[in-house]
Image: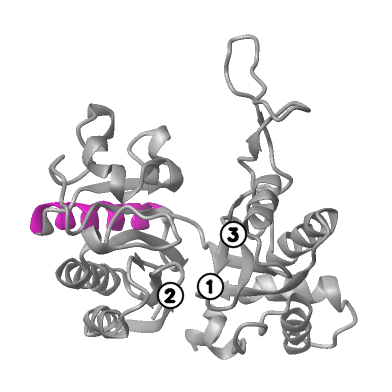
């Protein structure tokens, strides 16, 4: 395949393997789609799916997966630890090779139009496909989550980009767009106190946190507006979560540009902030795929004398503790290995 697009849809179901498999089956049924993985998380009650292929095949796979999710997932009964707005929560298209960002934007718009018209699901565009600046950030669109969607749709400011401004109780809404390769990277702490994980997330994420004075009150500027303090890491989104299955707290991050903040830099910063709070880090995990380059960068940081790329990758896996929760298989987790 010379023209390759990656799609990483997130579905609001992580506990029913039957439903996850049905969605995966719908996607992988499309000729030309290479299905990479489906990674369900029971605590989040969410599954991250990854597949690649040529543009037409990937777009068809994304639509069939969304249609199957609409059939099987009932958002009126959904509870989970991750922010979400719909059954098919977000569908990003990512250029890998021979495809431009502009082409992925076009794919997102065509996908969104079809979902809105054929499935009667409101669709919002984000990131590079955003129709207006305030919709570029996924968290802004998700604000209020599924529970606040009915009221949100009544606000003309939040008229969907595709589909009617009508609340679909069963499926919620879907967000789609085009973006650079994102690494979903989580650092595990040596505590189960999610408040500490949230504190670290607020300290490091680019958006930062609200400034407070010595008494804990929010700081306001001369105009009466809330003052924010920027986080320590650029191109990073983060939040604190509790993993019940492992009884640990975790700093869950999206590294939206790994050239700006690669995994090893995020890991070391979380370790630094954790130490300041009297706790440590136990390891980390990559959800979905990672470019090989990101691990080689980490290997060069931790083992600069390593004699080969394979040795650098092995050093990175060890230093980052990527096998703490489950074995890290580089043949399954590195995107270049999947495309051989």
Query: Picture quarter containing residue 171?
Result: bottom left
Q: Examine the rendering and report whether any part of residue 301 can be seen.
A: yes
Q: Residue at x 66, y 85 (%)?
A: 323
Range of magenta residues: 102-118
Crowd around label 3: few <14 · some 14–19 · many ≥20 (10 Å): many
Q: Residue at x 84, y 88 (%)?
A: 307
In the figure, is residue 84 to the left or right of 228?
left
State the quadrant of the N terminus: bottom left
Q: Residue at x 22, y 58 (%)?
A: 76
Instruction: Report which residue position mark 2 lands on.
Output: 42
The CA distance from mark 2 to mark 1 is 9 Å
Q: Is residue 309 above or below residue 264?
A: below
Q: Position of residue 156 (x, y in %)?
A: 22, 28
Instruction: Report which residue position mark 3 lands on.
Output: 253
Q: Is residue 62 above or below residue 85?
A: below
SS for dot 2: loop
Comparing marks 2 and 3, which lies closer to the viewer? 2
Query: Picture quarter containing residue 17?
Result: bottom left
- Res 244 label: 1
Is 46 part of what is drawn in magenta? Answer: no
The CA distance from mark 3 to mark 1 is 18 Å
Q: Are marks 2 and 1 in contact (CB under 8 Å)?
A: yes
The furthest residue to the right: 305
Q: Earlier in the sequence, mark 2 or mark 1?
A: 2
In the figure, is residue 25 to the left or right of 179?
left
């Amino acid at each position: 395949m010379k023209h390759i697009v990656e799609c990483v849809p997130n579905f609001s179901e992580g506990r029913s393997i039957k439903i996850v498999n049905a969605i995966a089956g719908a996607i992988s049924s499309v000729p030309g789609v290479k299905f990479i993985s489906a990674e369900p998380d029971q605590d989040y009650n969410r599954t991250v799916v990854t597949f690649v292929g040529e543009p037409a095949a990937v777009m068809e796979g994304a639509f069939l997966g969304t249609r199957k999710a609409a059939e099987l997932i009932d958002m009126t009964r959904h509870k989970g630890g991750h922010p979400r707005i719909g059954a098919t929560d977000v569908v990003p298209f990512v250029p890998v090779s021979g495809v431009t960002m502009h082409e992925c934007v076009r794919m997102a718009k065509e996908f969104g139009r079809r979902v809105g018209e054929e499935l009667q699901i409101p669709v919002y565009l984000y990131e590079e496909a955003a129709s207006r600046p305030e919709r570029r950030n996924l968290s802004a669109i998700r604000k209020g989550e599924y529970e606040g969607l009915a009221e949100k749709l009544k606000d003309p400011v939040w008229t969907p980009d595709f589909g009617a401004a009508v609340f679909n109780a069963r499926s919620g809404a879907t967000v789609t767009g085009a973006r650079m390769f994102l690494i979903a990277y989580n650092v595990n702490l040596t505590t189960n106190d999610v408040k500490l994980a949230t504190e670290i997330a607020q300290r490091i994420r680019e958006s930062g946190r609200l400034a407070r004075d010595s008494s804990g009150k929010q700081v306001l500027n001369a105009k009466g507006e809330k003052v924010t303090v920027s986080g320590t890491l650029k191109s990073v989104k983060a939040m604190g979560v509790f993993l019940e299955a492992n009884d640990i707290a975790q700093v869950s991050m999206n590294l939206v540009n790994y050239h700006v903040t690669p995994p090893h830099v995020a890991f070391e910063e979380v370790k630094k902030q954790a130490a300041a709070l009297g706790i440590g880090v136990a390891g980390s995990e990559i959800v979905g795929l990672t470019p090989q380059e990101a691990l080689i960068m980490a290997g060069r940081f931790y083992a600069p004398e390593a004699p080969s790329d394979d040795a650098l990758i092995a050093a990175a896996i060890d230093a980052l503790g990527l096998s703490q929760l489950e074995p890290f298989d580089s043949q399954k987790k590195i995107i270049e290995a999947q495309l051989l």
